[in-house]
Image: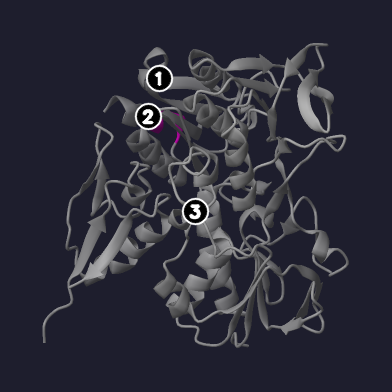
Amino acid sequence: MRRTVVRVVVDYDLCESNAICMQVAPEVFEVRDDDFLYVLNETPGEEMRAKVEEAVQRCPKQAISIAVD
Amino acid sequence: MALTNALIVGASLAGIRAAETLRRDGFDGPIAMVGDELHRPYDRPPLSKQVLAGEWAVERTALLEDDAVDGLELDWHLGRRATRLDLSRREVELDDGALLGFDGAIVATGARPRTIPTGGLTGIHTLRTMDDAMAIRAGFEAGPRVVVVGAGFIGAEVAATARMLGLDVTLVEAAPAPMERGLGRELGMVCADLHRDHGVDLRLGVGVEGFEGTGRVEAVRLSDDSTVPADLVVVGIGVVPNTDWLEGSGLTIDNGVLCDETCLAATGVVAAGDVARWPNRRFGEVMRVEHWDNAVEQGVAAARRLLVGEGAGTPFEPVPWFWSDQYDRKIQLAGRPNDADEVTVVTGAIDERRFAALYRRGDRLAAVFGMNRPRHVMQYRQLIADGASWDAALESASS
């Protein structure tokens, strides 16, 4: 059986670097000093899923989504 | 007793996030959702910005995609207002007389704008709903002289959007600084300069005496005896929680629905979002928070509280946070500032309009303000959540 891969997708046209995602899941999201969001790990694995889902829900711009490959 | 029949009153952000949480946490019973607007649930922050500027179509503000709406399997009652809650019979009455039963209810009816008497003149608006935004947007098309009454967040954002559209804007505020309630005076004054530099005629420490005009507003009369010509007025002087329908229900109503520290208002009844008031243990303060992020977090927390049933529940103790986009600046604040706090800039510079500042209360870090410093605001928000001392916060600033 193939392992489910959670893939983090950011719509950079929507992202305004509010950095909520960074507080919720710093293992995955980082807003750097240039004020841009960097995804540190695009496929963070099932154990991070709850945190990434919270980041999706709390993003003020609804710029984050999860794709399941 | 486990939850079997859920009712959510209020189909905006807190209500929707609560519904999602019930489903995500495994509740598969019926959920009724009551909302007094006919629109599918939408996001309000863009109303004063992208929607007002005409940059976004209405559909882009949807809180949920259509398939996500279907996936929640809610029993929708849109365009209906709840008029009464009966705690003993466990039912809510709607304005068409329908009765909806429940064993668990989430009160998320939000708040409505405060108003001032308009003398029956047209052209005077408030901004809370999509319909409000569309009406102001339509008014902007004629290139009006705009007067914004109240320089809180809504007023300041409307002023910024109107200026970006090239409209003449006068922003009137009774307090000595814009956004003073949210930011304190010192940083409110930094925002005052931001608006002046963009050509807003800012009148601080001045109240509104009344409106002049025949049929339609033509001028705003101020408390300093001046009169400002106006073709369109937006009044943004705060909101009042929508609790009228709960009078006599047995719930405690006191500037919102008073809850315990877990968002529980009565057995099987929780509240979330702008309408909820609860003791936040982290700050030792009974608070009602009107921010977007709180509606999300409290919607989730209140739904989970219902699912716990007669169990103890988890105290809801967030560090309040908000953002406001004005011109090309992102203003953010986390924590609970008050005017007695000492403010220190820790990174960047005020005159560059890119900086973070901390609020000190005694030996604690009480709040953090950022202008175009999202990373720093979040880092300090975490320190506030961790209960960091002032010295530890400063140390983190220099490291």
User: Percent x, y for residue B72?
Assistant: 47, 78
N-terminal of the pair, mark 2 or mark 3, is 3
- The image shows residue B175, relative to residue B241, as above or below, that is above
Nearest to N terminus: mark 1 or mark 3? 3
Is residue B195 placed above or below B52 in the rendered structure?
above
Label 3: chain? B
Question: Mark 3 falls on what kind of element?
Answer: helix
Q: Residue at x 69, y 52 (%)?
A: B111
Quarter of the picture containing the N terminus of chain B is: bottom right
Question: On the image, numbered disc 1 is attached to which residue?
Answer: B353
Q: Are marks 2 and 1 on the same chain?
A: yes
Q: Is residue A28 left or right of residue B360?
A: left
Q: Amino acid at mark 1?
A: Arg
Q: CA distance from mark 1 to mark 3?
A: 32 Å
- The first of marks 2 and 1 along the sequence is 1
Residue carrying label 2: B372
Establish whether labels 1 and 3 are both on one chain: yes
Query: Is B220 left, or right, of B335 in this rendering?
Result: right
Amino acid residing under circle 2:
Asn
Dominant SS type (magenta): helix
Return the mark for residue B390: none
Q: CA distance from mark 2 to mark 1?
A: 7 Å
Q: Is residue B268 above or below residue B387?
A: below
Indicate yes or no whether the magenta region holds residue B214.
no
Q: Check the residue under mark 1 and report the chain it is in.
A: B
Q: Are marks 1 and 3 in contact (CB under 8 Å)?
A: no
In which quadrant of the rendered view does residue B98 lie?
bottom right
Which span of residues is magenta-colored?
Answer: B389-393
